Amino acid sequence: MQSVHLDWLERAGIELALLRLDQVDALVSGNKWFKLAPYLKQAADLGLEGVMSLGGAHSNHLHALAAAGARFGFRTVGLLRGEEQDNPTVADLRQLGMQLHWLGYGGYRRRHEADFWKHWRERYPDLLPVGEGGGGLPGAQGCALLVAQIRGQLAGLGWSDYQQLWVACGTGTTLAGLVLGEDGAHPVVGALAVPPGHGVEEQVPELLTEAGVEASGYRLVDASRGGFARIDPELARFILDSEAESGVPLEPLYTGKLLLALRDEVAAGRIVRGSRIVAVHTGGLQGRRAMQERLQELAAQRE
Ligand SMILES: *Cc1c(COP(=O)(O)O)cnc(C)c1O
């Protein structure tokens, strides 16, 4: 955990600490590692040789899986959305030893159908299939451990407590895990990286109910700025300025949008002076490499 200095926080009398999951390992980065860990244990317990999973061509999840396979010596297969392409993420996946299959767009859309995995299970009987992004209750439970990690590091910041815990949401699995870990101790705020109505509102209570707890202790704010992966000039400028000021690298899909949504809440006076906030830096920086130029172009544009 690291305390972060940004002008707009200081002026509002609010302190922010980031849990830097982008720094847990040189290769295996971000919340995706915590979502994956329970599945890796399942695969090991079943005596399997490795794991296969799904994602897009910039997927942080497939990147973490491939990196974990390389780090710990198990086999990985990635089923990718769309037609074969090259980008820094795909180059890493290959280099990390992941075997890739490109499913096209239609083929990828079939992933929710009941018999989707049948073919892949037959082809790879020694691999554990894991759904997109490492979702599901095991993925959430892997993230519940983060709350203990936060608690253990508060003293190092000179903090005795905090008032809110913030995290960016794609599917809401990580958020559900943090709610489980908090068990009511602190409210968790989920900053939606996908627009409202794209499943997080249902997914989080479903996971909490499946875990046998009440679906409460969190709220959602719309951080999506009109679309998942949509980047506008204000966001691009905010990211580049915040990075320069704080020294913390961000990316525009999740962590940049999270901090901008936090700034908007602070500006709207919805967070009281004297508050201490913990936000999870969920990583994803590998995906930024393909976007650097675009960020700079957008930041240079006038409103
Ligand atoms: C996947 C991802 C998220 C969202 O996690 P969910 O558990 O799907 O809500 C947030 N930040 C980054 C960097 C991610 O890669």
Image (cartoon, rainbow, N blue to C red):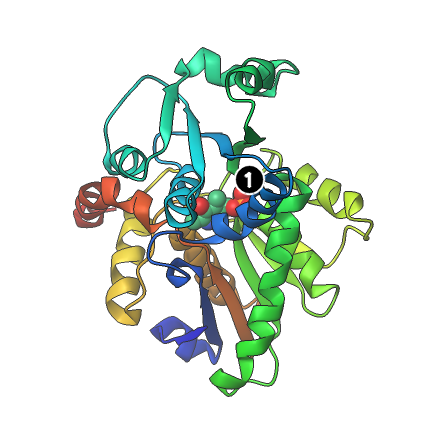
Look at the image and tell me whether residue 223 can be seen.
Answer: no
Q: Which residue is situated farthest in the front direction here?
A: 47
Residue located at (47% from left, 81% from top): 13
Pick the residue in front: 261 or 159.
159
221 relative to 251 in the view: left or right: right
Query: Where does residue 95 sit, x and y in percent of width and height?
Result: 26, 37
Residue located beneath label 1 in the image:
134
Quarter of the image where one finds residue 274: bottom right
Q: Is residue 64 above or below residue 4?
A: above
Residue located at (29% from left, 37% from top): 89
11 relative to 124 in the view: left or right: left
Q: How crowded is mark 1: few (under 14 residues within 10 Å), some or many (20 or more)?
A: many
Say if disc 1 is inside 8 Å of ligand 1: yes
Query: Where does residue 173 sit, x and y in percent of width and height?
Result: 61, 45
Pick the residue in front: 259 or 131.
131
Residue located at (62% from left, 69% from top): 148
Q: In this view, does 260 lie above or below 51?
A: below
Residue located at (41% from left, 78% from top): 11
Amino acid type assigned to the residue bearing label 1 in the image: Gly
Query: Where does residue 194 sit, x and y in percent of width and height?
Result: 50, 39
Q: Is mark 1 on a helix, strand or loop?
A: helix
Query: Where does residue 284 sit, x and y in percent of width and height?
Result: 38, 49
